[in-house]
Image: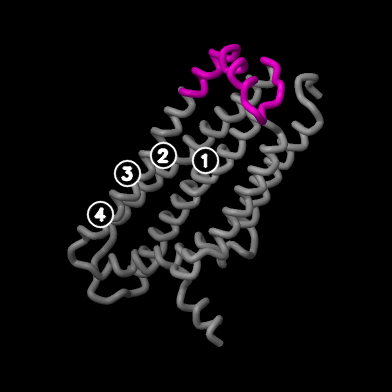
């Protein structure tokens, strides 16, 4: 154990990763995945691609795709800017520590501890950048598949299979995008570690609760849930 950290710091970091990894397992790899916002959005992507096959003019589809790509590029570029800003903070450690000493909730921190905390934030945003960059690559592949999609007056088996494959690729892209956004949310909690480990624990718990609620019990969930779920609830 590093002498610059208290036992409470280790508890806070451990709880932080338990929240992040636990939420990822719940949303991405558990049986609850299909009942989440992400799971229902995959069904809407399937409908979108099947409708796209039937459309003669696909300007609407290309506009939707362009708006998705713009959002991905925004977050990817923002991640790089945040990494650059944190590297600047890392180079001015002494000045920043002197400022943190005046905060009412700030805990005394050594240079080594401060640098480790900043490095954690840098790693989080580097991870987010890679997720957004790979999401952009997948969206590029989706645009090519949309351009290669056949146009049929009726949705036959071959066209339906092609549409479902594009939808799966879009869902895979969306999964990486959501992992990048997830890193942003938990980075907000990690920022609290710069002030106080107790605040770090509270922030990690708050982020976890908010994300679970938005994924499974939000107004967004009630709006986008598929017809099958709505019919089952009505019964």
Left/right of residue 24 with respect to residue 18 in the rendered view: left
* Disc assigned to residue 184: 1
Instruction: Write the start and end of the magenta stretch as one range.
Output: 85-111
Residue at image location 28% in from the left, 60% down from the top? 149
Q: Does residue 230 sit above or below 58 in this rendering?
A: below
Query: Do the residues bearing badges 2 and 1 touch, measured as CB atoms within 8 Å?
Result: yes
Residue 97 sits inside the magenta stretch: yes
State the SS at label 3. Answer: helix
First along the sequence among labels 4 and 3: 4
Query: Which residue is disc 3 drawn over?
Result: 70
First along the sequence among labels 1 and 3: 3
State the SS at label 1. Answer: helix
Whole-percent x and y of residue 227? 46, 77
Residue at image location 52% in from the left, 40% down from the top? 184
First along the sequence among labels 4 and 2: 4
Of badges 4 and 2, nearer the viewer stands 2
For the residues labelled 1 and 3, the Cα–Cα distance comes to 18 Å
Query: Which residue is disc 4 drawn over?
Result: 62
For the residues labelled 2 and 1, the Cα–Cα distance comes to 10 Å
Left/right of residue 9 with respect to residue 52 in the rendered view: right
Q: Indicate the quadrant containing the C terminus: top left, top right, bottom left or bottom right.
A: bottom right
Q: Does residue 103 sit above or below 135 in this rendering?
A: above
């Amino acid at each position: 154990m590093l002498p610059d950290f208290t036992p409470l710091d280790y508890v806070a970091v451990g709880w932080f990763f338990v929240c992040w990894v636990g939420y990822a397992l719940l949303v991405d790899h558990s049986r609850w995945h299909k009942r989440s916002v992400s799971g229902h959005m995959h069904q809407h992507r399937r409908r979108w691609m099947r409708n796209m096959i039937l459309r003669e003019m696909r300007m609407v589809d290309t506009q939707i795709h362009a708006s998705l790509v713009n959002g991905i590029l925004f977050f990817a570029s923002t991640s790089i800017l945040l990494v650059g800003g944190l590297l600047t903070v890392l180079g001015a450690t002494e000045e920043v520590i002197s400022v943190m000493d005046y905060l009412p909730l700030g805990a005394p921190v050594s240079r080594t501890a401060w640098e480790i905390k900043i490095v954690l934030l840098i790693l989080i945003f580097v991870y987010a950048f890679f997720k957004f960059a790979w999401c952009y690559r997948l969206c590029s592949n989706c645009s090519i598949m949309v351009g290669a999609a056949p146009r049929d007056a009726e949705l036959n088996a071959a066209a339906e299979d092609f549409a479902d494959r594009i939808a799966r690729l879009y869902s895979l892209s969306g999964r990486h995008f959501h992992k990048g956004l997830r890193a942003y949310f938990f980075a907000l909690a990690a920022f609290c570690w710069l002030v106080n480990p107790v605040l770090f624990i509270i922030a990690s718990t708050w982020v976890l609760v908010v994300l679970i609620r938005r994924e499974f019990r939000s107004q967004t969930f009630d709006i986008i849930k598929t017809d099958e779920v709505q019919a089952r609830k009505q019964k």
